Image: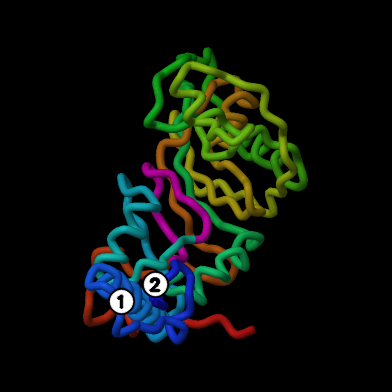
Amino acid sequence: MNQHFWIPGQAENDIKISPTCPPAGRKFQMFGRYKLERNRNMKEKEEEKPSGFLLVNKPTDWTSHDVVGFLRGVTKIKKIGHAGTLDPFAEGLLIVAVGRDSTKRIDEFKNLDKTYLTKIKLGTETDTYDKTGKITNKITPKIKPTKKEVEKVLKNFLGKQSQLPPMYSAKKIKGKKLYELAREGIEVERKPHEITIKKITLKKYKYPFLTIEVNCTTGTYIRTLAFDIGKKLKTGAYCEKLKRESIGTFLLKKAKKVKKFNKKNWRKNLFQILT
């Protein structure tokens, strides 16, 4: 007696239900056909959904993954990713890819230059190089740096240079993220990587705060830049505020606040990249 049972991975058209098959086997074969059909329909529906990119203004106290999670709920699309992580304390432009085809193209944004506006506090250092960390050092300078001295120090950071990634970062060493090691109290040797600061402008200065705008290549840690500026000024420093204003030619002013996206308008805000 020939009985045909469904084998996982077998093509749907190859599934044949024999009239002589016992009830248990028949039920199993029917389930196999249903499962294959369901998976195929889900894949077709996923491919039919809109695909493109969104310019999102990430608020402070949200992780980049929080933004992705929120937009999954709005769009009902699982395949969503983002280009260029922003720290939770930071705000500003986040490019979000929606749909299977768009998430495959996220890497196209990786090498684009970025522009940041950052507020730096002098006189204090933290273990994370930003306001969220533990204070590790406080310095009270006998003479506060003048505006001219600050501008002179900033000019020293223009051009190509090596930058050491902070311990509290998502950079991986031997498969483990640095911030995971840092939370365990483990500090490891990090290799500096090459970056380029293309433009650095002093926007405002009144001790202990200075605000600068930085245009830089990908991979630049603004927190590390703030820390290094503090070292050069001999005051210590950490990053108080951070806002990403642009990624390549994509501007923050064209972005929409994350909570402004809803089921009715998100499709209208999708844009495509021409190949």
Q: Is residue 261 visible?
A: no
Region in magenta: 83-96
Q: Position of residue 183 (x, y in %)?
A: 44, 23
Residue closer to the observer: 22 or 14 = 22
Pointer 2: residues within 10 angstroms few (<14), some, or many (20+)?
A: some
Q: Earlier in the sequence, mark 2 or mark 1?
A: 2
Q: Which residue is mark 2?
A: 5
Task: Report the mark closest to the observer, 2 or 1.
Answer: 1
Q: Residue 117, position in %: x, y?
A: 49, 51
Say what secondary structure mark 1 lies in: loop
- For the point 46% across and 61% down, the residue is 82
75 sits left or right of 201 in the view: left
Q: Quadrant of residue 163?
A: top right
Front-most of 63 and 75?
75
The residue closer to the viewer here, 80 or 39, is 39
The answer to whether residue 161 shows anywhere in this view is yes
Left or right: residue 66 versus residue 159 is: left
Quadrant in which the C terminus is drawn: bottom right
Q: Would you place residue 236 above or below residue 201 in this image?
A: above
Q: Name the residue that disc number 1 marks.
A: 21
CB of mark 2 within 8 Å of CB of mark 1? yes
Name the element at disc 2.
loop
Question: Is 30 within the magenta?
Answer: no
Q: What's the amino acid at mark 1?
A: Cys
Label 2 vs label 1: CA separation?
9 Å
Instruction: Write the residue at 44% across / 29% down.
Output: 208
Instruction: Using a 10 Å C-alpha cutoff, classify the residue at mark 1 as few (fewer than 14 neighbours), some (14 to 19) or many (20 or more).
Output: some
Left or right? Give the position of 183 relative to 177: left
Of residues 269 and 38, which is closer to you in this image?
A: 38
Looking at the picture, how far across and down is residue 261, in whole percent?
27, 71
Within the image, what quadrant is residue 225 found in? top right
Q: x, y percentage for residue 246?
A: 52, 63
